[in-house]
Amino acid sequence: MMRVPRHWNALFLAVLLGLCMFCTAEEIRVGTGDNCAWIDTGTANSCRVTVREKWSRFAVFDLGEIDKPTHFIIRQDFEVGEGCFEGHNPESVKLSAFPLDILSGKVGEKPVWQLETVGVDGHFRGNDFYGVEAPGCCDSQDTTLYYSLRTGKLAGASTNRPLDIGIPNTSFWRFITTQSDLASERKGIKDANINIFYASKDGLMQSVGIILPEKLAEGSRVYQWSFLGKGKEHTRCDLFGAKTIAGAAVVLESNIVSSFSITLPFGDDGFDISKASMEGVEAKLLTESYPDAAPDENE
């Protein structure tokens, strides 16, 4: 019996399915338009066949303005490859926000904002942020990169659960994320073992970098954090009815190498690291502000 090359079988199958749009001896493309995949037939004898996928999703985002409806079409483009190698290659997420006149049904030709970043998938977090998922590889940790749906600007990066805090005497919620030094995609202050991000729905407002002593750096990889005086299950702290934010803080704790905790109190609208307290550690705290993402009076 004549032996049929293995890649021929894949080729015949794709043709029979009516999906083969472009084929070579080493590559098969299946699917059409923005939803397709490339199969590397040259990797048939490896531990895993290499497949590169490309797909798109669309969603409508409402700015929530009462007087005038303002909407965007959020286009999400993904390109992800998997095979006999660690991680993903490529791993790309591109977001584009096109203006939408919801009454006439007209969509603008040019995006209001656009960004491209490392990631393999994404999700909407409420009506303010889009989370791009960047899985860890080898020793790195899974990381979620958050972007403002209003501006497309970075709003944080997280290897842990996000927290939300309501600012007294306003209607503003603030979004807080934390990232270890093993994040798959690192953001924030360089050389910090832990980065904490404070954001409005327009984007990042402040980052705090925690530099630990070398003997405790391992403890930055696994830790817990929560609002001061609240249980670990509380991820939201509503201070709208309070007269001041004084006394509110987040506490970061670790007991990996040795037990330590760092308490970061809030200032008027951000962290006040001059009043930070520490137990079991002498860490260096650095901070950066991002005034371009500060909210306006109409937020």
Image (cartoon, rainbow, N blue to C red):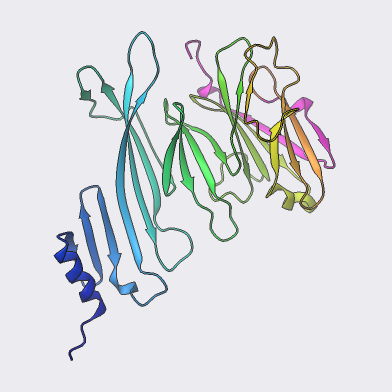
Position in image of residue 124 (x %, y %): 43, 34
- The answer to whether residue 284 is above or below residue 65 is below
Q: Is residue 165 left or right of residue 67?
A: right
Q: Is residue 189 left or right of residue 254?
A: left
Q: Is residue 176 left or right of residue 212?
A: left
Position in image of residue 111 (x %, y %): 30, 30
- Report the magenta residues as a range: 271-299
Q: Is residue 28 left or right of residue 97?
A: left
Q: Dividing the picture into quarters, in which one does residue 75 lie?
A: top left
Q: Residue at x 59, y 44 (%)?
A: 159
Residue sitting at the far right: 280
Q: Residue at x 43, y 39 (%)?
A: 123
- Whether residue 187 is visible here, answered yes or no, is yes
Position in image of residue 26 (x %, y %): 25, 71
* Residue 284 within the magenta-colored segment of the rendering: yes
Q: Dividing the picture into quarters, in which one does residue 67 lie?
A: top left
Q: Residue at x 19, y 68 (%)?
A: 13
Number of numbered markers: 0
Quarter placement of the N terminus: bottom left
Residue sitting at the far bottom: 1
- The answer to whether residue 84 is above or below residue 165 is below
